[in-house]
């Protein structure tokens, strides 16, 4: 009888441990089924991406963009993650998915009519394992925590891919500069910085521009930071060249996007020259994507904004691009004015993905290519998709591209040129030096080549197809993960 009790006790301990290892609670009387008795006890716990995502959904139920970004990354790194049991022991995946810090604040400012206005301001400091927090500020009516958390999460891996010492962050406000006077934009930027300055610094967090935040807005914020702190330091990137900005910084995201596209085409033995390209957006990224396409002999035939898109079958040449830059950067006009000036097709309330071309490069905003658009692009013979924007392609559309075996690269790799040159601007500010345009452009080109090489290293499949999504995610993840492990549980 004593022996029997000892065996029962030992059995109960073992099966209880097994259940707890699987995340289950044993019953109070330890009544286990025959099937449970016969199952072997796991030697180590494995990360399951679907379970992690489901847990995050329950914790953050109203943040679809954030959950989408996390889901896309975790599904591709699960295999590599589980090769390192020390990662799961340290609960690395949860620590990597949840931001280090969320800062929210009210921004109060006065419009030109003397009315007091309020907006929300945010800064999501996601991870600083490999360097100071780094990421843009977005001013747009759609801004909320879910969007900024997704952007900060993506930024962490993107910055890791550049090989530069930068962590990941993102911030902004639901304020929109559209339709505002320069004076109103200045007053808002100054009010925004009166709180943000407490949470940033050249070795802590270095913001930059994003949608709605260009050189004008960066200048106003930098001026207010300097006034509040009495310090002139490299606290923002994308500054004017007269006060610490880097050459090539405005062009960097668009140029880098095209450099990456060139590398993708080379893997298939193809050349960019002579190709027809669909470009969405008409802001900074789209403008300089088109400029570099022109320089390399390709023909961009579309641009868009939130109202619709233009289709110019003759191509957007240097003269037409100069008009777009004046229209968008100075006059703050709408892209339909291009169609009116040059007599080309304008489609209101639509995106350009149903036009025929060789290549597509979405440069506007998240989730702009859906499954239907992806199928149309494939049917129309598109051979490559290189993302200039952040997460512009929904998961179902990515599957369409990958199933068709066309060249497809996510924005965390192909649009990393912007933050790469921001990192170079930080270096120049620290050195109190200013590099030549040629030097910065060459460094940008080298960085994009290195990012592409890492994507190929980790993304090449047994059949030779390069899964750039997996390659970018695994390469970016490993550097951050190893840094976090080396620094302990913090």
Image (cartoon, rainbow, N blue to C red):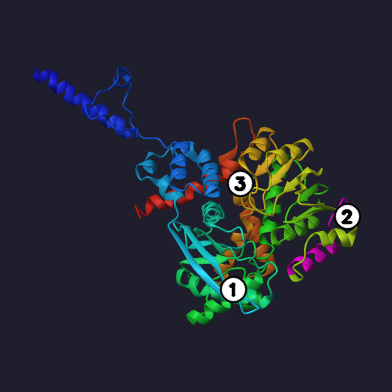
The residue under the point 9% across, 20% down is 2
Classed neighbour count for the residue bearing mark 2: other residues with Cα under 10 Å, few (<14), some (14–19), many (≥20) = some
Quadrant including the C terminus: bottom left
- Does 355 appear above or below 194? above
The residue under the point 59% across, 31% down is 462
The residue under the point 59% across, 42% down is 469
Q: Secondary structure at mark 2?
A: loop
Magenta span: predominant SS is helix
The quadrant in which residue 415 appears is bottom right
Q: Which residues are magenta?
A: 312-329
Quick one: label 3 or label 2, which is nearer the N terminus? 2
Q: Marks 3 and 1, how far apart in space?
A: 42 Å
As drawn, is 387 to the left or to the right of 382? left
Residue 270 seen in the figure: yes
Which residue in the protein does label 2 denote?
344
Instruction: Residue 164: say if magenta.
Output: no
Which residue in the protein does label 1 denote?
188
Classed neighbour count for the residue bearing mark 3: other residues with Cα under 10 Å, few (<14), some (14–19), many (≥20) = some
Quick one: label 2 or label 1, which is nearer the N terminus? 1
Q: Which of 109 and 52 lies nearest the eye of the viewer?
A: 109
Q: Which of 241 and 300 lies nearest the eye of the viewer?
A: 300
Q: Position of residue 42 (x, y in %)?
A: 34, 29
- Does 150 appear above or below 331? above
Instruction: Residue 325: say if magenta.
Output: yes
As drawn, is 258 to the left or to the right of 317? left
As drawn, is 4 to the left or to the right of 139? left
Q: Position of residue 160 (x, y in %)?
A: 52, 53
Residue 234 seen in the figure: no
Q: Which of 64 and 411 lies nearest the eye of the viewer?
A: 64
Which residue in the protein does label 3 denote?
453
């Amino acid at each position: 009888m004593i022996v029997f009790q000892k065996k029962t006790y030992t059995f109960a301990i073992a099966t209880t441990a097994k259940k707890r290892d699987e995340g289950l609670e044993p019953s109070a009387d330890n009544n286990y089924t025959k099937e449970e008795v016969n199952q072997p006890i796991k030697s180590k716990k494995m990360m399951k991406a679907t379970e992690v995502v489901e847990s995050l959904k329950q914790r953050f139920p109203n943040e679809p963009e954030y959950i989408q970004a996390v889901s896309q990354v975790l599904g591709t790194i699960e295999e590599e993650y589980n090769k390192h049991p020390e990662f799961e022991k340290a609960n690395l995946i949860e620590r990597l998915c949840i931001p280090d810090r969320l800062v929210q604040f009210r921004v109060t400012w006065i419009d030109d009519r003397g009315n007091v206005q309020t907006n929300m301001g945010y800064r999501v400091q996601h991870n600083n394992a490999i360097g100071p927090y780094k990421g843009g500020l977005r001013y747009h009516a759609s801004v909320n925590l879910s969007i900024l958390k997704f952007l900060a999460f993506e930024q962490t891996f993107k910055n890791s891919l550049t090989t530069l010492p930068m962590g990941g962050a993102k911030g902004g406000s639901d304020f929109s500069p559209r339709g505002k006077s320069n004076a109103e934009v200045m007053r808002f930027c100054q009010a925004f910085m009166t709180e943000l300055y407490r949470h940033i610094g050249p070795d802590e967090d270095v913001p930059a521009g994003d949608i709605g935040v260009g050189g004008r807005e960066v200048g106003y914020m930098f001026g207010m930071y300097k006034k509040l702190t009495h310090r002139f330091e490299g606290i923002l990137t994308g500054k004017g060249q007269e006060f610490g900005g880097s050459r090539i910084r405005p062009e960097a995201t668009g140029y880098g996007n095209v450099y990456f596209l060139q590398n993708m085409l080379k893997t298939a033995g193809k050349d960019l020259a002579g190709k027809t390209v669909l470009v969405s957006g008409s802001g900074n990224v789209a403008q300089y994507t088109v400029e570099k396409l022109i320089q390399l002999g390709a023909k961009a035939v579309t641009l868009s904004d939130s109202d619709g898109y233009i289709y110019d079958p003759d191509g957007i040449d240097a003269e037409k691009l100069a008009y777009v830059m004046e229209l968008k950067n100075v006059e703050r006009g709408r892209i339909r004015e291009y169609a009116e000036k040059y007599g080309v097709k304008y489609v209101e309330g639509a995106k350009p993905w149903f036009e025929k071309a060789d290549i597509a490069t979405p440069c506007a905003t998240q989730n702009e290519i859906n499954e239907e658009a992806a199928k149309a692009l494939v049917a129309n013979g598109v051979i490559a998709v290189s993302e200039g924007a952040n997460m512009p392609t929904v998961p179902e559309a990515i599957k369409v591209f990958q199933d068709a075996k066309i060249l497809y690269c996510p924005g965390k790799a192909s649009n990393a040129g912007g933050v790469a040159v921001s990192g170079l601007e930080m270096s120049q500010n620290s050195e109190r030096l200013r590099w030549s345009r040629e030097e910065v452009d060459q460094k940008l080109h080298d960085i994009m080549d290195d990012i592409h090489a890492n994507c190929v290293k980790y993304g090449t499949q047994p059949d030779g197809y390069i899964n750039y999504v997996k390659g970018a995610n695994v390469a970016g993840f490993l550097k951050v993960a190893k840094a976090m492990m080396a620094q302990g549980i913090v």
